[in-house]
Each structure stands twice: as structure tokens, then as C-alpha cells.
Image (cartoon, rainbow, N blue to C red):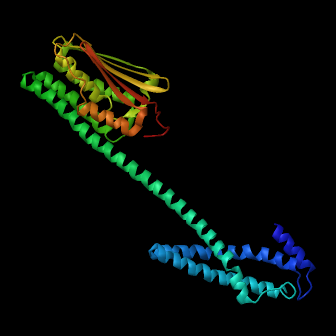
Amino acid sequence: MLGVELAVAGIARARPGRADAATAIAITLLTYPLLWCALAPVVERLERAVRAAAVRPAARLLLHAAAAASLSAVHTSVAWSLRSALGVGTDAGLPPLADALLQWMPLNVLAYAMILGAWSALRYRDEAAARAREARRLEEELASARLRALRMQLDPHFLFNTMHTVAMLVRGGRGEEAVTMLAGFSDLLRGVLLADHRDLVPLREEVALAERYLGIEAVRFGDRLHVQVDVAEEAAGAMVPALLLQPIVENAVRHGIDLRPQGGTIALAARVEAGGLRVVVEDAGDEIATPRRPGSGVGLGATRERLARRFGDDAGVTLEVHPAGARATVRLPVIRAQAGAG
């Protein structure tokens, strides 16, 4: 603003064809930055052209040096012409154009370098932001692909084990029970196919699917299998990954109830505690003579990985094993269904 004020005051005092030293300085301070502002888009285009040429750093430096010298000559020539037209130079010592070109060259090269640096910084910022967006997109796609692969691994595991249970009844000559079990399996299969089209489902649907599975197993175990379900209403509406409970319930049946001659109880409970969803699947009964290992087979292993990839440290599965039973605890963030979601 000081340069503008000096320029206005100087021009107001100047006589036609003449200007004093103060007016010359004021006009110089006014025209110098304005001319470089006008040349800034040219510098930006030159920067793009040199970058697109894909030349070596030394050649790039030479190209920018030539560009700086050329724009410096343009800048000085225009400024010199303006000062001459305004009468600045008669008494203020306006040097010849050739001398002005040499005198202003260092400062003009510095101005070119500053503008070039500013454009380069903006370009690098935009490119970094674009790379970050692309990296996030690729990471999301990779995570989604891995989740789909885990689902493809988990779903056949679920269905094949259920079919194996039906086959055991058929081989054992328990035809009526096999028919009843196949009818339950049909309902179960419908639920699985429905869940396969959605990533998240209400917990109550997962509980209903687990109860269908346990109903099928009840045909085989008879009074050896007892089921207890205690799901709080606020937990029932929370959204969870589809087919979350089935492998955990299946694990309790295969490694708990199936190994006990007297059978036992499978208890399923869910509560919202301290802002998180806690789901517990527990099998209990007589002590098992042969201790079992808290393994990480396909079912539980895939469930752990699904939760880790989707929720990170905010979710997980723990399995506590003891001679009289085992307890699997699923920890999840509370996710509510969006209004109007279908």
C-alpha cells in the first residue's frame, strides 16, 4: 500500500514530461509487482511444459534459466516503456533500456524463482492429495475384496457342516428326523442366502439364524442339547456383520455338546455395555475328559479376520476354554440401522 500511495502522490505532483526521483520510485514500486502478477500464469504454463518434457534435471534448470531471462527482458521492457510514457526519467535518471535490462535481471530472476516455487508447491500439494485419495480408494477396495474372500471361505464351511449333520441322520436310519432336519435346513439356507446380499444385518436376525441352526442340531442331539437365549432389546437392533454368530455357535456344538455323552447347554446372550455391543456364546455341561484346544479354525479364524479388517481394534473375538465348557465373547461397536435403509 505504501508503494501505491507514493505512486499516486508522485503522479499528482508530476508535471507533463517530467517526474522527480520520488515519483520514479513510486511508479517502480507500483508497476514491478503488478507486472509479475500478470506474468505469473505464463510461469505456471512454462513449469508445466518443462515438466512434461521429462528432461534431465540439468536440462530442466537450463530451460528455466532461459525462461527467467526472457520474462525478465519482457518485464523490464514493459516497465521501462511505462516509465518513459509517464515522463519518468528525464530528471530522475532513467537509464537506457539496455542498462535497465542488466540492472533488473537479478531481481527479476529471483521473482521468477519465487513464482515458480509457489506453483510447484501448489502442484505437489494437489498431487499428494490425489495420491492420498487414490491410496484410500485402493485400500478400501482391497479390504472389501478380502472380506468377500473370507465370506466365500466361511459360507461353504457353514453349509457343508450342516449337510454333514443331515447325512449322519440318514446313515443312522433316522429318516423322519432327517426329513425334519432338511425342512429346517431349507429355512436356514434361505436365511443364509438373504444375509449374503447384505454386509450388515440386525443382531436379531443373526440370533434367529443361530436358533434355526440349533433347531437342526436338536433333531440329532434330542434332549442332550438345551438352548438359552437372552438378548436385550437395545442389543437386538444393533447392526452386525452377516453370519457372525453361526460359526461361533457351530464351534460350541462341535467342540462342546458333541463331546459330552450327557450333552449340555448353549447359552447366547447380548448386551450393550459402555457404548459397545457384547455378544457371548457359551457351552456348559459335564467336564470333557479329553481337553480341547482353543483353536482358530476356519470359522473362528475367518470371523476374527472379518472383524479386524472392518472395525480394527474396535472389535474382536476372545475364546476362553475350560474343562466344563467354553465361552466366546464378541466385542463390537454399536451400529444402528439408518432410517429408510433397506
Residue at 72% x, 87% y is 99
Q: Quadrant of the C terminus?
A: top left
* Left-right relation of 79 to 15: left
Taking depth in this image into account, of 290 and 99 the one nearest to the observer is 99
Q: Would you place residue 153 above or below residue 203 in this image?
A: below
Taking depth in this image into account, of 289 and 69 the one nearest to the observer is 69
Taking depth in this image into account, of 16 and 147 the one nearest to the observer is 16
Q: Would you place residue 160 above or below residue 272 in this image?
A: below
Residue at 61% x, 77% y is 42
Q: Would you place residue 36 above or below residue 199 in this image?
A: below
Q: Would you place residue 3 above or below residue 192 in this image?
A: below
User: Is residue 39 something that shows in the picture?
Assistant: yes
* Left-right relation of 192 to 241: left
* Left-right relation of 134 to 28: left
Using the rendered view, name the quadrant where residue 86 is placed: bottom right
Residue at 87% x, 74% y is 8
Using the rendered view, name the quadrant where residue 26 is placed: bottom right
Using the rendered view, name the quadrant where residue 20 is placed: bottom right
* Left-right relation of 151 to 27: left
Residue at 88% x, 89% y is 17
Total labels drawn: 0
**What is the x, y in percent for residue 326?**
28, 18
**What is the x, y in percent for residue 181?**
18, 25
Taking depth in this image into account, of 142 and 87 the one nearest to the observer is 87
**What is the x, y in percent for residue 331?**
40, 27
Q: Quadrant of the N terminus?
A: bottom right
User: Is residue 38 something that shows in the picture?
Assistant: no
**What is the x, y in percent for residue 268?**
34, 20
